[in-house]
Image: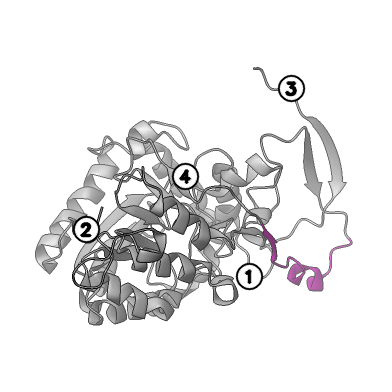
Amino acid sequence: MQKRPKSHVVIPTKRRTGGARGRAAQSNVSGRYEKVARDAFDDGWATGSEKDRVKTTVIEESPRKIINYVDSPFVDFDRSINPYRGCEHGCIYCFARPTHAYYGLSPGLDFEAKLFAKPNAAALLERELGAPGYKLAPIAIGTNTDPYQPIERQRRIMRGVLETLQRFRHPVSILTKSNLIESDIDVIGDLARHGVVKAMLSITTLDASLARAMEPRASAPRKRLEAVAALAEAGVPTGVMAAPMIPGLNDHELESILEAARDAGAAFVGYTIIRLPLEVSDLFKEWLDEAAGARAARVMRAIREMNGGRDYDPQWSRAIKPRSERARLIDMRFKAACRRLGLSTKTPKLRLDAFRRPVENGGQLSLFGESARP
């Protein structure tokens, strides 16, 4: 079905130079599904105090299912859980931003300031895992929005999800940019003792200033490394994802990030190249012009080189084997650094045989007082 063309409305939206305080997006561009597109211009009435007025709002929703089944050639899992939609970390390069457009919201400031929480996530998970027809496979958490974004401190939805997984001894992988993961180290540590969990901390840069500008409400790089150390000390298989690598902006830090990961106790590592799908491209370029100045054009030329001449092409940037010369060089550097540092590029396999259904979900008591495995 062909999309209807958008009507354009020019509105005085106090265009922000440098963005709102604590936010990465410079604007609130219309989503691609909206019938009206709004063009912002500076009407001269904006004041400095208005830069502080983009506050976080949280809407509770009650989905009917919590496990999302994934069919993609680009990922190594077939199911995931997202306790939240939108992400307060506000990483300007986040490939998940376009998902907000499905709900009539902007992938820009709305994505990082208008959030959705799923308070019934643990109850839904309990029901789905206990269903007679459930087929076991590891669940990935943190693949779309961060489960440990700041609102998790009050909501504790991820905590409830982990406690449910703990009761079932269900295999799970966790990816985050937040040291808030340490608050659940008791549950994660117990899962690790059964061989059913692995965790990764994503580190984009060791430069605190760049991190603050690019991912304004994520934990500082040093706090993420401290979380790596704490998890490793607790016996949790822990890795670091050097991601995303942005040519001309942070790719020169690749070896330093891997060395810091090794020193913190990471057992395995990975990396990804920046992806700029749909609205993310314009949002990133808008931010880049503000943050990088004269370097912005050079960074975008390098990104396009790694995407076959486009801002984003998954057949290039997500290819199994790097297709551009720059991407091949980054891959060679990554592998050489891993060899030198003794870091594995393979993530540990999670056990499936530890899975059990708790007694209260209809499991049969075993001779040892636990519910029998299916």
Sequence-wise, which precedes: disc 1 or disc 2?
A: 1
Q: Which residue was labeled with disc 2?
A: 350
Q: Residues within 10 Å of mark 3 (few under 14, many from 20)?
A: few
Sequence-wise, which precedes: disc 3 or disc 4?
A: 3
Magenta segment range? 45-60
Q: CA distance from mark 2 to mark 3?
A: 47 Å
Do callouts 3 and 1 mark residues in contact (Cβ within 8 Å)? no
- Residue 345 placement, left or right of 97: left
- Which marked residue is nearer to the observer: mark 1 or mark 4? 1
Do callouts 3 and 4 mark residues in contact (Cβ within 8 Å)? no
- Name the residue at 31% across, 44% down: 135
Q: Which residue was labeled with disc 1?
A: 22
- Which marked residue is nearer to the observer: mark 3 or mark 4? 3
- Residue 346 placement, left or right of 371: left
Assign a secondary structure to mark 3: loop
Amino acid type at mark 1: Gly
Give the label on residue 127, or none: none
Amino acid type at mark 4: Met
Query: Which of 187 and 50 lies nearest the eye of the viewer?
Result: 187
- Name the residue at 33% across, 39% down: 74
Q: Which residue was labeled with disc 4?
A: 300
Sequence-wise, which precedes: disc 1 or disc 4?
A: 1
Amino acid type at mark 2: Leu
Sequence-wise, which precedes: disc 2 or disc 3?
A: 3
Amino acid type at mark 3: Arg
Q: Residues within 10 Å of mark 1 (few under 14, many from 20)?
A: some
Q: CA distance from mark 1 to mark 2?
A: 37 Å
Q: Residue 55, image x and y in percent?
A: 73, 68
Q: Is residue 42 above or below residue 20?
A: above
